[in-house]
Image: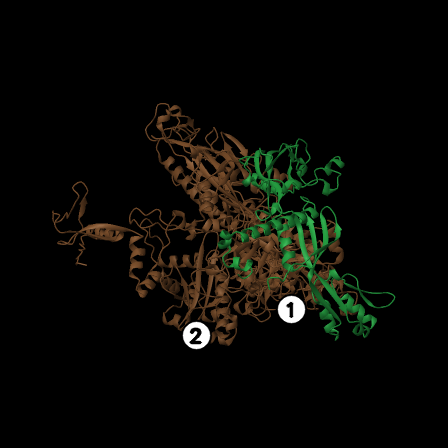
Amino acid sequence: MVINDVDVREDPAWLKKHKTGKGQALEAPVKNAVDKFQLLPAFLKVRGLVKQHIDSFNYFVNCEIKKIIHAKANEKITSDVDPNYYIKYLDIYVGKPSLEQDYMVESITPQQCRLRDITYAAPISVDIEYTRGKEIVSRKSKQGQGGVVIGRMPIMLRSSRCVLTGKTEAQVAKLGECPLDPGGYFVVKGTEKVILIQEQLSKNRIIIDTDSSGCVAASVTSSTHERKSKTNFLVKHERIYVRLNTFTDDVPIIVVFKAMGMESDQEIVQLVGRDPRYAGILTPSLQECSSLGVYTENQALEYLGTKVKVMQKAWMKQTKSKVDEARDILQNVFLAHVPVKEYNFRQKCIYVGVILRRMLEAMMDPSFVDDKDYVGNKRLELAGQLIALLFEDLFKRMNSEIKRLVDSTFAKPNRSTVFDVAKVIRPDMLSQGLEHAISSGNWTVKRFRMERKGVTQVVSRLSFIAALGHMTRISSQFEKTRKVSGPRALQPSQWGMLCPCDTPEGEACGLTKNLALMTHVTTDEEEGPLINLCTTLGVEDLSMLTGDEINSTKAYMVIFNGLMLGVHRRPNWFANTLRLLRRCGKIGEFVSIFTNPKQRCVYVASDGGRVCRPLVIADQGISRVKEHHMKELKDGFRTFDDFLREGLVEYLDVNEENNTLIALYESEATSRTTHIEIEPFTILGVCAGLIPFPHHNQSPRNTYQCAMGKQAMGNIAYNQLCRMDTLLYLLVYPQRPLLTTRSIELVKYDKLGAGQNATVAVMSYSGYDIEDAIVMNKSSLDRGFGRCIVMKKASAPIKKYANRTSDRIVAPRLIADKEGCLRVPDRAQILDYDGIGGVGEIIRPGDIYINKESPINTRDTVPNPMAIPDSAYKPTPMTYKGPPGECAIVDKVLLTSNDEQQFMIKVLFRHTRRPEIGDKFSSRHGQKGVCGTIVQQEDFPFSERGICPDLIMNPHGFPSRMTIGKMIELLGGKAGVLSGKFHYGSAFGEPSGHADTVEAISATLVKHGFSYCGKDFLYSGITGNPLQSYIFMGPIYYQKLKHMVLDKMHARASGPRMVLTRQPTEGRSREGGLRLGEMERDCLIAHGSSMLLLERLMISSDQFVVQVCTKCGLLGHHNHKLRMSFCSTCRNGENIATMKLPYACKLLFQELQSMNIVPKLDLAEA
Amino acid sequence: MDNVSYQRFPTVRIREIKDDFLKFELRNTDASMANALRRVVLAEVPTIAIDLVEIEMNSSVLNDEFIAHRLGLIPLTSERAMDMKFSRDCDACDGDGKCEFCSIEFTLNVKCTSDQTLDVTSHDLVPSDQQYPVYPVGFMERAEYGGYEEDPPEQRGILIVKLRRGQELKLRAIARKGIGKDHAKWSPAATITFQYEPEIHINEALMETLTLEEKKEWVDSCPTKMFDIDANTEQVVVVDAEAYAYDDEIIKKADAMGKPGLVNIISREDSFIFTIESTGALKAADMFLNAIEILKMKLDAVRLSMETEENDDQFGELGAHMRGGL
């Protein structure tokens, strides 16, 4: 990391403050630390936890979509046939989510969409101007609704277009939505889909790297609206080449220079730099160029022309010469993002010069090589940007469709009516394109040859935290299968931006990341004004300067979003002035200014996708945020934005952090300190924030908990009982943790907890607690500990068929029993008169819950489709399938229809479960374990106060796991119970008072008459004698995980077999057998237990009796009528032997026979 | 050998007795006896609790089995429990709640008609049988308090569910006799515990070697405040020996001060201090008396089987032990 001492003295604000006298600056800074914690809730109030998604979507809907339709290539559609014809887009609007039903437009809520399986989408409408016949017509907007609807845009929940924005909690609740739900996802066809944040390497930036052979290489990924290209620079045989997809071969860099009009070698070298060593390294390249005989621009272009890949497109007429083609490539493909106006390649030359210089520097000093994994070189692509890509593609496709339609209409010689384009625009393509991409997660943009899979995921609603954690997840573009450690490793620059704990184990380890609590992801910002501002502040334009001047030691190059703007002679003044302007709010708060003295550059960035976070500004180590500011915040006179506007707090991105010296606490600040952290625990993300005292744990334990917190059962949302999810796990009595953290309060985990505070005794008991198993108290279970509800959804569509018949639901048909009375069949007992299971009825496996009947004939036209006789229907009932022996309850029935008038019935089944042996539990410290045994309370140890644990955990769980945090949680929880208040355990919170110290907790314990170390004197419940040692006992928050024995246990004696092979089926869902695999088979072979092998592999599997002809060796058959066996080949039954072999073997023989291979059995007398 | 009697004569001295609280000393016996009593109170003293719920109407936010579970855990006055029959042993009925010997029927019928949230509590559970009434705990005392809102919280009954306007809960519940071994709802004890009585001997001679400050320091080191310093004599006195939690803190402190043996604490292994708290289903004292009754019955069962030859086999080797090594 480069630490550049920013000269504060140049900061005018500082000067003003310290003008009074020199002596003042020498005074020791007053260091009474201000509690800045309150900034955090204030920050989350304005930003929210998923603001990055919402901001990005809002930016797309409000700005980017307008830019797309006004782009030169999209704005106007003309006809090839009629030159006078045009359609011009004037404006575009994305409305409020609504649905047209029976020609009525109704606004819809997300909850309706979830229940009805429809898409939460809003109409996209445009204002257009076009010619109709001879007149110019325009369709303009009325009340924010454009003239013509071109499609429907799925709307992100809680974005600016969502019905939930700006509503109070009560209003949100009225719409059936949970007020604590963060939003940031879409509802598409009833399923909630989140577009994962995609991590990518920066676009339009020079990355110096080394290739596999250790040579320096540079690469630039250019991205503009029109084009995406990748340009590589590499060193081969000490010469520098350019590699471009459109060239068949690597081309020498000097040739490229010459082709761009820089014919003089001296000029080239000057452009690269004045260091004499540069010329030395460049010599071989220069020599190669002259050996190729390339001296002039034209020669160079001709040379490049020969290297251009020939496009085999028959329909394209070869109009351009090779030279033109090469020039076009240099203009449009080679470093596509650097603008070239009227074939003036000057700017591109300078750009290449800079690349070359940085390559040469890297050749001489490897420390100049860029780190690809450095977070500052990464950009995060969010929902808005991804949808923008897709939208533009679909929009272009729609335009070309319209153009095709227009052309074909005008091509017809005689038209009866005047062609009106507004009537032929079909909105389906856009709607379906967007809907399909979000629901399938396949992002295909042909234009950029982009094809990504798994961009969207179904929001995990296992627990509240799982859903929240899903919104902050970042998926990397990096291949999961490659075995490289670099991209997976924890990067120091991740500090404060990405959570160091929350990453999955296994193949995606380190590639899937999560945002930290205070991270913000920027959106694009207007470039024009910023460029103007830079020029006003004294950036000298490049076109006025020679190569020598550009590279002069005095000047720093100013690079704006990857483009060279010019040079500045006072870079520090320039940077500080820009920062000052940012702190005043004159330029966007997310603009980053970063001076890099090593590269002698000032980087100004305003592009989208950078991660940044807020920090308190300090002047010479003295925080600008003072006590009175915090008081005003507390009293509600101040918001986070005020802090930002007044320049007390600012956002820094990863690059700019390099120019700062950030103190963790105010007390640690020195005079060189420029910023102070708001709170150190904000380096963790949402999931890791739940862990109490994570800084006392071994680090992988926190990672494990991050994964397990997402599997914990609890409350999902306030509207959890109104939802119809396919699978829902709820806890009957969820609690808020006794030992909380600040993060828990900030993310509202205390309102939607997923676990219970269990009194845990750390001791060994009964032997059923080995390997992390836990012993549970039966009475605790009786009283509701760990009790959970599992809800499963089943739905049945009422189909309509082509012949206008449809499925129907009828009351159960009565059947006569033995005595002749008409009775409801047993399987249909729970049905109501409407033929649907009654709510509250107990349902057993095999019971019918929807008595559906389908017409037998669904194809031929029927005279009266609504009144066909009963006999024309066949029963197609829906039966409940569940674990045998267990019964569920019909919880809810929903009758609804979707936007295509498809009627459907959804039924929710509820199953309440109490913990049983084998259910999985976990504390918040990555310590999972199954329930080993359940013991009566009277057998449990008890203290002389009458306290009896809920749970016994084996102490062997501690030494190797080193989860000290769990021990402190136990102590803190015990102290909390005794003193009647919640104790805190925020990460790194001891110095700032957000975590209680062990000393303080011990003092509380002693005050209430307990041992300071949390140990209690227990008596054995079995004998009544005191236990030999003191037992560490206290409350720990335990989570019940979704893995339950009931869903997993499986055994079979005999059961179903596969039709083809007659072998037992496989898998629990098919009631399959347990396989004796090859390795087990090998053991038995080695052991020589042949009869067991025979029994396992044939007799108990697919034994089959065959008739074999001993003469021809082929299989015969048995005629049951004649009671004789025959050989079909020999046409007699004389030499038939009967034997047993696996059916699979017989099948193999027959299959071989079918491909003309004849296996013969040669039988010998046994 | 045979004539040696191991018979002891345990004594009980009651220290404190309330309806729901009992503290007494049990002397001249050993841990097996004390623990047997504790275990019987917890697991085998019968009480009455709701066991079967028939829900007629439930439009509350909680689902049927949730409410049924909550109803089950409500303690009911169980004085009758000892005289009642277990539903499984009852010959007079098939256990559907129409039987006076084994079951008690309750009804609950509440509907919220106001805009305020209505708390459905255990007071809304009405026993339908008026002959041998069994009530939810605190049901009778309810009459002393008029309305619901201003009552002290402990008199408002046990909350079952809250209803908003229009919601309704109507059900029939059948309470049965049962024991804590089957389900914790039948356990009459909220707390039952005992401790060995500690005997504390202060080594006065050694204590005199301490200064007043040292004494204070030593006394304060005990988390449970067993000792105090007499203001007049400046001597360390035992204030509350039973507060001692056997945590060794005081002994460790004495060792740390360089005075090992300053105090000698031994636990008397033949006397116990019992603490019993009741859920309200039974009076604490009744609970304990019932426990003795049941323990006696259990011992009788053992003795009976001991006397009958044919039952010998059922105990196997244990039988030989019981017969005294024959």
Where does residue B202 sit, x and y in percent of width and height? 77, 69
Q: In this picture, is A643 found above or below A303?
A: above
Precedes in sequence: disc 2 or disc 1: 1
Does dot 1 land on a helix, a strand or a loop? loop
* Front one among A1145 and A439: A1145
Q: Mark 1 points at which residue?
A: A5
User: Badge 2 sits on which subunit?
Assistant: A
Q: What colour is chain B?
A: green
In the image, what residue type sits under mark 1?
A: Asp
- Image quadrant in which you'd find residue A900: top left
Q: What colour is chain A?
A: brown
Where does residue A1016 sit, x and y in percent of width and height? 66, 61
Where does residue A579 sit, x and y in percent of width and height? 65, 60
Give me the C-alpha separation between circle 2 and circle 1: 38 Å
Q: Name the residue under label 2.
A: A283
Does dot 2 land on a helix, a strand or a loop? helix
Label tally: 2
Quarter containing the N terminus of chain B? bottom right
The dot on residue A1015 is: none
Give the number of the mark in front: 2 or 1. Answer: 1
* Front one among B300 and A835: B300
Q: Does any portion of residue A405 appear in the rendered image?
A: yes
